Every structure is written in structure tokens, then in C-alpha cells.
Amino acid sequence: PLRTNGLCNFGKINYLLGRGAYLRQRYSRYPTIDFCRNPGAICSESSNINDSDEVNTKELKYVISLFEWIERIQLYSNSVSKWDYMDQLKLYVDEGFKDSGFIDAVSSVVTRGCDDYYCSTHAIFMMEERRKNFEFLVHNIFGLGSTTQSQPRYDYDHFEKWVQSKRTRIEGTVLVSQNNYVEGLPYFSQSFTFDSFISALRVTARFGVSDGLFFYVGDPVSGERGFRAGVVNLAAFLANAMVESIVYDSCDETYWESSSDGKYPMSNTCGQ
């Protein structure tokens, strides 16, 4: 659902999750997949992958995009603008889930690589849609802002159980694509399914991509505040993913940053 571009990124994925990790005798989620030689394995249903990896590959699209979110969004910090994603995420929770400036800045980082509205000459592609998606997820799907009746242990298991309880609404309103050949007729996404999403979330949030690289879903020490920040983090991810890929039911890489002459930089993997 998010961009995976450049040889460096494929190299990281291979080193942390693929054949590269296996050859270095470290745990590898995908030991038979060499992402450097076969980057198409991320999207392909038949990418010369052993049958034993069939179940794992269904989650690949999510795992890779969650990895991208961890690296490009969760770790984002701008010393000039003083905007740090994790700080702003928790501030958004503390201020009652009301500041639309948060998702605007996040979407700017996703599409333009910087947080300030005037940091780039390029507009934020489909900003209104991203904002609507985020608000809908936070308030309507996830129901944030309401009080809780109990104080459970806010660990990963609690988070996954909570997401599982939202399955019907997520499948019916979030993981929905549009058929452009039939006047945008909505249908359940075939590429982005709920079970694959949960599997990928478990990989990136519970076990982690590598040491210190986890998709943030809160932690027991942070309690309810951390849990709610984790839900907002997930909402921000899905709000952008809905616009980037889910609506198209596509795993193709997406680039919004063309130069003034309309050409795309060579650093973009597909060249476009």
C-alpha cells in the first residue's frame, strides 16, 4: 500500500526479512526469497517461490508496506520544523483526536517526504480523501474518544484482539476496492485481505522487522494512552493505504513526486 522504491530499500528488506538474513544465519521470515534478484515477489502470486512459502507470501504486501511505514513515518523527525512523528502522534491523542493538522502533516511525509505544508512545490495528492479516511477510521471504525470501562493489559495481544473485533467494519469499509470499468462499483479487495493484514501486523508489531524496528501499537508501560496512539498510528497508515493502493486493488508502486517537466527521477525503481 505504500511505496517501496530504490535498490537500497529492496536490499534492506532482503537483509532483514529475506534470503540475505537466511544466508547470514539469522531468522528470516522469507528465507527462499531474494528480494534483490526478484523484487516482483512482493506483488506476484507466483514469483518462483517455494510452495512452503505460499502462506507467508500472501502477507508480503502488508509486511513490506508496514516496514516502509516504520522506517519512513514512525522514525521521521525534522530538527528544522521541530516536527517528530511519535511526539505528534501522542500529542494528537492527548488533545482528544481533534487536530486535522496531524494527518495533513503525515500525508505530506508519505507523499512528499517532508511535514510542512510549504515544504514542497508539489501538492499533497488526494489530501481531502486521506483526511476523510483518517477521520472515519479514528471516530467511526475505531471509535476513539469514548471512555473505556476496564483497564486491560495493553500489550500486542490486546491490540490484535481489539482489531479483530473490528473485522466486519474494516472488511466492509476499509479493504474495499473500486471497479473502474463498472462506474467505480465497490468490491472486497482481492489483494488486500483482512487475514493477510493481521498476519503482517503480527510480524511487524509483535515480533518486529529487526531489533528496534516495530510497527507501533502501544505498550503495557504506556497503558491506554499508548494503546490509543497505536490505534491512531494504524488509522494513519490505513488512511493513506486506502488512497495509495487499496482502492485500486493494486500492489504497483506509486510515485507522486515528478519534476517540473513531468518526468520521474531515475531513483524511482520503475522509472515511470
Image (spheres, helix red, strand yellow):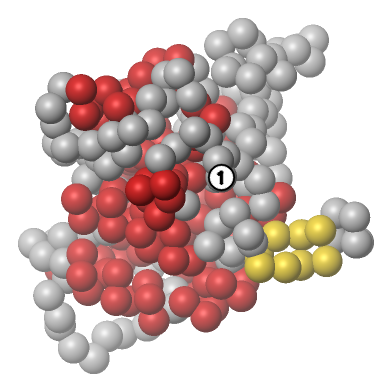
Give the residue pinned by disc 1. 45
Name which residue lies at 42% across and 19% down: 36
Instruction: Determine crowd level at label 1: few under 14, some 14-19, many 20+ residues with C-alpha closer than 10 A.
Output: few
Q: Is residue 10 above or below residue 99?
A: above
Question: 237 left or right of 229?
Answer: right
Residue type indicated by callout 1: Glu
Q: Quadrant of residue 13?
A: top left
Q: Is residue 123 above or below residue 207?
A: above
Which residue is more in the foreground, 207 or 262? 207
The residue most toward the front is 51
Which residue is more in the foreground, 46 or 30? 46
Percent from the top left, x then y, of residue 141? Answer: 50, 75
Percent from the top left, x then y, of residue 78? Answer: 35, 27
Percent from the top left, x then y, of residue 192? Answer: 56, 57
Percent from the top left, x then y, of residue 34? Answer: 38, 25
Let me know if residue 179 appears in the view.
yes
Which residue is more in the foreground, 44 or 106? 44
Q: Quadrant of the C terminus?
A: top right
Let me know if residue 13 appears in the view.
no
Q: Quadrant of residue 187?
A: bottom right
Q: Quadrant of the N terminus?
A: top right
Q: Is residue 219 above or below residue 84?
A: below
Name which residue lies at 12% across and 27% down: 25
Question: 228 left or right of 237?
Answer: left
